[in-house]
Image (cartoon, rainbow, N blue to C red):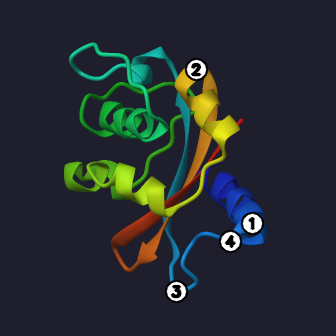
Amino acid sequence: MKSHSILLFTTITLALSAGIAKSDEVIDGYSAYIGQDDLYNSKGDRLTQPWQVIRQDRANYHKFGIRQDGDEDDSYFASEANRAKAEAMLAQGEISRADGKRILRGDTTIHVMIYGRGTVGRSLRVIAE
């Protein structure tokens, strides 16, 4: 299932790759369901930016073991240091305003492609459905 999601998403993103540096390649990717648990940080504060929700979703998955149907594994965001880079990576990547709003509402599935070189991530491309 994960390989099918990545293949489909890669095909779509190849056609849309305007903002990603041409020297970067897909180094990882995953799909995840954004549920209510992902919309709040560990202190219970409501998150207000899409990158915050993406970071919290990956912390829930990797650190806290909070997983929902539709959540896939990734190796990149298993690292807390890499999760801390989510804001900068999304700023260098692509997400539509509509997809950002979907993420902040929750109850949506996201597809995330991580671009970089080797094991160094530089940008994210995010699509919500």
| Distance from the alpha carbon under mark 4 to that under mark 1 | 6 Å
The residue nearer to you, when weighing 110 against 100, is 100
Callout 3 crowding tier (Cα within 10 Å): few <14, some 14–19, many ≥20: few
Residue under pointer 3:
23
Q: Residues within 10 Å of mark 2 (few under 14, many from 20)?
A: some
Q: Quadrant of residue 120?
A: bottom left
> Which of the two residues, 67 or 25, is positioned nearer the viewer here?
25
| Alpha-carbon span between mark 2 and mark 4 | 27 Å
- Residue positioned 36% across, 19% down in the render: 40
Disc 1 vs disc 2: Cβ atoms closer than 8 Å? no
Q: Is residue 105 above or below residue 2?
A: above
The kind of residue tagged 2 is Arg
Element marked by disc 2: helix
Q: Amino acid at mark 1?
A: Leu
Q: What residue is at 43 percent from the left and 32 percent from the top?
A: 53
Residue beneath disc 4: 18
Q: Residue 91, position in %: x, y?
A: 46, 56
Disc 4 secondary structure class:
loop
Q: Where does label 2 land, which residue?
A: 105
Q: Amino acid at mark 3?
A: Ser
Which label was assigned to residue 16? Answer: 1
What whole-number distance in Å separates the C-alpha atoms at marks 3 and 4?
A: 12 Å
- Are the residues tagged 4 and 1 within 8 Å (C-beta)? yes
